Image (cartoon, rainbow, N blue to C red):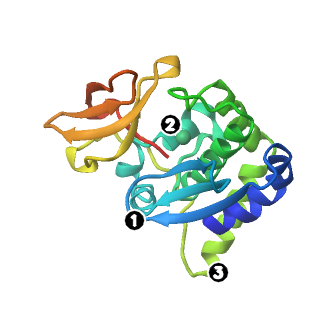
Amino acid sequence: MCQTTRTILWQPAKEWVRERNNRAGLVLRVGSGQATYHRYDPRTKQHLINYGARMIAAKRQPATAQGWLSSREIRERGYFGGEVSELNLLAHTCCHEFAHLLQYSAGQRRYGSVHNRHFYEVLDQLHASGAAEATRHHLAEQAAESALTLSRDVFKTVNQPVQAAQWQAGDQVCFGTGRQQKQGKVLRVNRKTCTVEVAHQPRNLLYRVPFSLLSPLG
Ligand SMILES: [Zn+2]
């Protein structure tokens, strides 16, 4: 995923990004947890994209893949024909995080409004332009070279209840839709809900959110 992001998404966009921020670089890495994110460090001018190993593991199985924001985006926005599969999910995850990099570079990432209209315009464009398709193709090729199979089997929507075991304190999650969407961090896993802390001035807000309404980010 790191190599694909660099080769297929970053290389052609690098000049555009550097016209806005002339020393910008990109670091790609795999983290051990679930957390999957884009972050920018203004001091070093480095964009960082972190892919979580637990996120990848979760997206290999229909039951654990269904709650993720990327599953919802593929289904609801019709990316890759609306088909959720292991390959499509991982390719889309590269596009999702890279769309944050482009969004940030365009100055459209605002505090408390991360998955905003501009973000989805960028993400739609990555899919419409063929960049997402190229990403999927490259990822499948890379995997095959390493003797890994990324399944193209389409996941059926399973109505299995989301389990407490899916969540851990510290997980980044979102809930709600559209302008009401909120993003925060799991503080505590309860029997049927998670207590989620959402950044807010002057004091952070706490929500108790049922498992079924929570999506891990990424
Ligand atoms: Zn995101």
- Could one spot residue 159 in this view of the protein? no
Residue 42 in the image: state x and y as whole percent: 63, 48
Placement of 72 over or under 46, stated as above or below: above
Placement of 147 over or under 16, stated as above or below: below
Checking the image for residue 32, the label placed there is 1
Q: Label 1: few (<14), some or many (≥20) within 10 Å?
A: few
- Determine the residue positioned at 34% across, 39% down: 185
Residue 43 in the image: state x and y as whole percent: 62, 52
Q: Label 3: few (<14), some or many (≥20) within 10 Å?
A: few
N-terminal of the pair, mark 3 or mark 1, is 1
**Element marked by disc 3:** helix
Q: Would residue 20 appear left or right of 167 to someone viewing this image?
A: right
Q: Amino acid at mark 1?
A: Ser
Disc 1 within 8 angstroms of ligand 1 (CB) = no
Give the CA distance from mark 2 to mark 3.
30 Å
- Determine the residue positioned at 56% across, 31% down: 115
